[in-house]
């Protein structure tokens, strides 16, 4: 949907105008900054730029759960895992404190990213704890079909099992992923890891 801002061949102009609105607009600066985060994160794959704008929003609105989560996601995009852990542990603390807006959707996202972070540090039991929680929340939330979080969580669980040498369990997870819709090329990854274990 964001591509409506960028008529064919005019992407640079669109980004320039969004940046200008983000920096100078009186009323639309927040929306422009939010769109810049999304464009750089999901379309341009320019994660450091996405992080720059996400940090602006999070600093300006530190109690806004959406901006808080985007800041964590963007840190994951640039591989800043210590900050990912700090951010999403903060999200979990706010959920536990009952802070307004910090709900089960935020918990699912926090559990997923904390699991991935622990996986990268080879804290495999801790990774599974978080990923199992993310999977449990997906089963509660995904009433209209499998979300991207459900698919990627199950793929990550399979990868952790492979890292633990539990090949049968890993293959079972990859088969689950293949039974879901294809999200972020998850089917290709699952097939690849069924042939060659994830390391």
Image: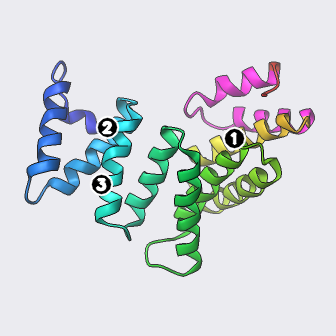
In the image, the segment drawn in magenta is 167-194
Query: Which residue: 52% across, 74% down?
Result: 94
Q: Name the residue under label 2.
A: 39
Specify how the rendered protein is coloured. rainbow
Residue 46: x %, y % from top left:
37, 31
Badge 1: residue crowd in 10 Å (few <14, some 14–19, many ≥20): some
- 3 or 66, nearer to the observer: 66
Query: Which residue: 58% across, 46% down?
Result: 81
Badge 2: residue crowd in 10 Å (few <14, some 14–19, many ≥20): some
Q: Name the residue under label 1.
A: 120
Query: Which residue: 66% across, 27% down?
Result: 187
Q: Is residue 64 magenta?
A: no
> Which of label 3 and label 2 is nearer to you?
3
Q: Name the residue under label 3.
A: 56
Q: Separation of disc 3 and disc 2 at Cα? A: 15 Å
Residue 142: x %, y % from top left:
59, 55
């Amino acid at each position: 949907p964001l591509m409506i801002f960028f008529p064919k061949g005019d992407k640079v102009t669109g980004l320039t105008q969004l940046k200008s609105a983000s920096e100078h607009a009186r009323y639309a600066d927040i929306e422009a900054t939010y769109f810049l985060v999304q464009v750089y994160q999901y379309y341009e794959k320019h994660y450091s730029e996405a992080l720059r704008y996400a940090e602006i929003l999070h600093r300006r609105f530190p109690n806004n759960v959406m901006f808080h989560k985007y800041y964590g996601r963007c840190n994951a995009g640039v591989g800043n895992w210590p900050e990912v852990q700090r951010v999403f542990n903060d999200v979990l603390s706010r959920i536990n404190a009952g802070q307004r807006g910090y709900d089960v959707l935020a918990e699912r996202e926090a559990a997923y990213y904390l699991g991935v972070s622990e996986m990268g540090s080879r804290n495999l039991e801790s990774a599974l704890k978080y990923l199992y929680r993310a999977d449990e929340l997906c089963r509660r939330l995904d009433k209209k079909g499998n979300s991207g979080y459900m698919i990627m969580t199950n793929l990550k669980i399979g990868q952790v099992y492979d890292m633990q040498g539990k090949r049968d369990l890993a293959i079972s997870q990859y088969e689950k992923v293949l039974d879901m819709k294809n999200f972020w090329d998850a089917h290709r990854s699952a097939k690849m890891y069924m042939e060659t274990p994830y390391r």
